[in-house]
Amino acid sequence: MTKIKSNKIIKNRTNYYKQVFVLFELLYAMKDREVIFMSKRNNKFCIRGLVILSIDYLQDMFKRYHINEKDYNIYVSLAKYKYIPTFNLDLTKRSLETREWFHKHARNNIKEYDMLLDFDVKDKKEFNKVVEETYLMTQFLNLSKVKYNLIPSGSGFQIKIPSECFDMKKEFANNEFNTKIYQITKTIKERFKLKHLCMIGIGAYNKIKKCEYSLVDDSVVFPLKYNNLQNRFDYKLLKSDLILKNFLFVRNDLKFHNNFTDEENKKNLMRFLKKYMLI
């Protein structure tokens, strides 16, 4: 595990993660999902299968695994689960338990699953292109009033289309959902010429995403307005001290087109998919 060398970042992380309203936001984002602590610089250092049910337990996990001093990013599963067992907290034993559960039981415990459009970049020179592609995608979703939310991921952006836009029971019963999600995402990438739309792991039942309101170093994974991407986007605006000072006291859980019923959300998504010949 890589330790954070900057005392300033450690101080900012400690201050951010001790705020009760931050912990409540994290708990809300983690509800019914697998929670993962993963090293930013080496994803082999990864603690999977955490289930967080209370702020006290979340604080205990932060303390146990030194969340402030180490370069852990926090992820959550795209899947919502009916049940996740409590695994051994001893990391030398934990991986065997989680591996067996994911292999034999996890899929049968999924009750909902979100779709993720993950825009990422390796070369920082391409970052403005990622901003442009992400903003373009939000405009197409807006035209069809598809429900989604938008977050920064640390090197790019993630658009989540939530499970209420899909007929989950039918799709999972037929074991078709993983394939459909992959094919739709691949077609979106090709149809809209989205060079930076990442396909790694798309459709996998155990696919994960960044956790809203968590930190990447000391930048907040803060829900964005799509028009934040209209002009040049600067990650410096997401530093934890600035977010605490300027934004977070007003809850910013932005889900666009959140005023529709589940049935209307399904119709809107289907309208989008058919309009652009994505299915």
Image (cartoon, grey):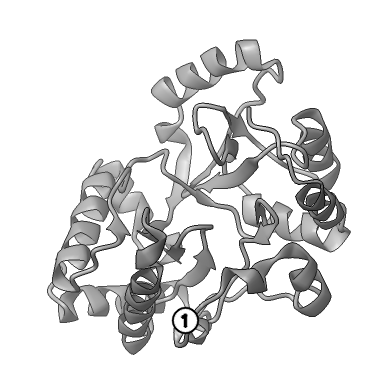
Q: Element type at marker 1?
A: helix
Q: Image height check: is 191 above or below 220?
A: below
Q: Position of residue 199 (x, y in %)?
A: 27, 51
Q: Position of residue 225 (x, y in %)?
A: 54, 81
Q: Report which residue position mark 1 lands on.
A: 229
In this picture, residue 164 sits left or right of residue 191: right
Is residue 76 or residue 7 the one in the foreground?
A: 7
**Tag 1: Cα neighbours inside 10 Å, few (<14), some, or many (≥20)?**
some
In this picture, residue 172 sits left or right of residue 81: left
Is residue 64 or residue 169 the one in the foreground?
A: 64
Give the residue displayed 65% in from the left and 40% down from the top. Answer: 71
Q: Image height check: is 201 above or below 112?
A: above
Q: Is residue 161 visible?
A: no
Q: Quadrant of residue 195?
A: bottom left
Quadrant of the snapshot with the C terminus: bottom left
Q: Amino acid at mark 1?
A: Leu
Q: Image height check: is 72 above or below 127?
A: above
Q: Position of residue 273 (x, y in %)?
A: 21, 73
Q: Image height check: is 110 above or below 234?
A: above
In this picture, residue 240 sits left or right of residue 256: right
Give the residue displayed 79% in from the left and 66% down from the top. Answer: 241
In this picture, residue 53 sits left or right of residue 132: right
Q: Position of residue 178 (x, y in %)?
A: 27, 45
Quadrant of the snapshot with the N terminus: top right
